[in-house]
Amino acid sequence: MSGASGERRGSGAIVDLSRPSGEGALAGGGELTVEVLVIGSGAGGATAAWELARAGHEVLVVEEGGDYVGAALTGRDGAMYDQLYMERGGRSTADLAIAILQGRVLGGGTVINAADVVPIPDGVARFWQTKHGLSDFSPEALAPFKAAALEDLSASTPGERQINANNALLREGAQALGLRHEIMMHNRVGCVGTGTCLIGCPMNAKKNARFVAIPRALEAGARFFVRARAVRLDDAGAEVKRVTLRTLDPKGYREERTLTVRAKIVILAANAIASAQLLLRSSVGNEHVGRHVMLQPQLPVTAFFDREIRFFRGIPQSTAVTEYERLDDPDRGFWGFRIESIAGTPGIVASMLPKLGLPGKEVMSRYAHMAASLLLVPDAPNGTITVDRAGNPVVAYAMPDEQKARYRDAIKAAARVYFAAGARSVQVPYARPLLLESPRDLDRVDALGFEPATAPFISAHQQGSVRFAASPRDGGASPEGLVHGARDVFVLDSSGFPSSASSHTMTPIMTVSRMLARRIAARRAG
Ligand SMILES: Cc1cc2nc3c(=O)[nH]c(=O)nc-3n(C[C@H](O)[C@H](O)[C@H](O)COP(=O)(O)OP(=O)(O)OC[C@H]3O[C@@H](n4cnc5c(N)ncnc54)[C@H](O)[C@@H]3O)c2cc1C
Ligand code: SF4
């Protein structure tokens, strides 16, 4: 069941094109003209829509997902991955080595994310200025937009009572070893600790795009079409662009009808895979589109304790061990690695553990004694996106040896932390599972070669596919987000980031989207 479709505020409205009530949008021979068309309603799209509507522009946002809020977010693994995730959670690199997780719902990834709020570090902004020629991205220029993002998110640090046992023991282990660590800010207000953040919050406690930017954009007159997929962009060099949309059925499985939207300004904010995909399938943009892709693959590790941890209760991800990360590496920007606690609902945990059948069942019988973290390793632009004949994205990714070495270092560091916190064992999910029973076993980690599809890597922070660059020789879009070779077609999501913006991408995307959307509005006004 969908959430609040049909919602109206001010002169704006959410229209579900899969329902008979959405038929009005298809009147006039299925053709529509607007001033600004935003593709995607997540961190980047919702923020841009709000800014541009507020500045008096006529804005239509199209979103291929449905609208799920409150009780419609049932907490049931299968149904929620099916409805809230891109390709039902099954998207991956072409070699199946890395699962690519992305939201597909009104509000995008902000609806299903872990609600951690980490802004762009100043070192990264300076790196973008000096190495990538983005002269307008100084820490000072970004500061007001960063502050506005934190305000939108009602960012705060979780209180001590909100740190669950899984996160507390990572902190305990880090403290015992004298490692730098932090409690991350989050965007929850009124959280009751159900632990189901990654399949949506039934309490509507996340101050995300669905509950901040989208209502404000509606009040400013923006319209949102849900179950509407953009499939092609034509006349990208003309004053009026033509975007072909397909409506989807109520569950988003099938394309149904065709609608054409004409718009003077097109904002791509469909995420770093889909924005590049749309440009590629429309043959718009230069040779950099689809290159320089970063997936920031994360590797889960689990630890078992004699006592019950019940990591599935409470806020899943609040502690980070930051000892090994660099925020201002002169050649890379954000680099090194960090360790962050995480929890999963039973379905996803069972699917990631390297054991099946009875052995898998035996591991899951110790679910309550399990602790887990993600090893977050920022990457260089090692990936590419192309499209197949049907227009689907094909993501290729080659992991260099240097990056594999950082995963091995990160596994050892996490294992030391867990043993310092009293773990009985640490399990590295791998094709041949590696069980470490004491710090003396750490050398065994050196044997992990990370050949494709031997470890359950997860990507939640895709970036760089249409990277901003001062010159078309170096990137797919200008520092203003304008797609090279097109007229008034902008990318306002993480596609533009020339290096990893941060350990978490929602806040950086909101920051940059607002800054660039304001510039677009100011130029139109001038
Ligand atoms: C499991 C998970 C956990 C995460 N945890 C955190 C976290 O704790 N903190 C953090 O900062 N970041 C986190 N992230 C990352 C963050 O949520 C994303 O980087 C961010 O939401 C991306 O914003 P976006 O605007 O680029 O795209 P999205 O938010 O992904 O929105 C894009 C929208 O466009 C729609 N779309 C795609 N193609 C089309 C099309 N052709 N036509 C119409 N609509 C289309 C999609 O359905 C989607 O809803 C997490 C991500 C995931 C997947
Ligand atoms: S832990 Fe809090 S924010 Fe997450 S789903 Fe539960 S109530 Fe919502």
Image: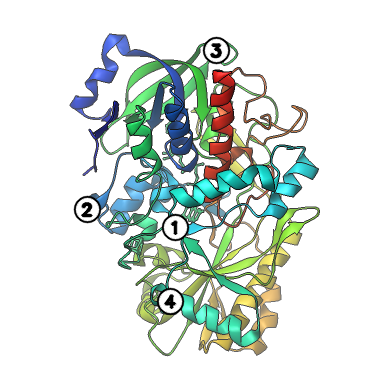
Does residue 389 appear anywhere in the picture? no
Please give the residue where the numbered disc 1 appears in the rendered image: 115
Quadrant that contains the N terminus:
top left
- Relative vertical location of residue 526 with respect to residue 2 in this rendering, above or below: above
Mark 4, Cα crowd under 10 Å, few <14 / some 14-19 / many 20+, is: few
Query: Residue 203 or 11: which is nearer the viewer?
Result: 11
User: What kind of element bears circle 4?
Assistant: helix
> Separation of disc 3 and disc 1 at Cα?
38 Å
User: What kind of element bears circle 2?
Assistant: helix
**CB within 8 Å, label 3 to label 2:** no
Q: Nearer the viewer, mark 3 or mark 2?
A: 2
Residue at x 70%, y 37% (from the top left corner) = 136
> Separation of disc 4 and disc 1 at Cα?
17 Å
User: What kind of element bears circle 3?
Assistant: loop
Ligand 1 has an atom within 8 Å of the beta carbon of the residue at disc 1? yes
Please give the residue where the numbered disc 2 appears in the rendered image: 71
> Separation of disc 2 and disc 1 at Cα?
19 Å
Q: Return the disc, 3 or 2, that comes first in the chain's sequence.
A: 2
Mark 2, Cα crowd under 10 Å, few <14 / some 14-19 / many 20+, is: some
Q: At which x and y percent is residue 11?
A: 29, 25
At label 3, the amino acid type is Asp
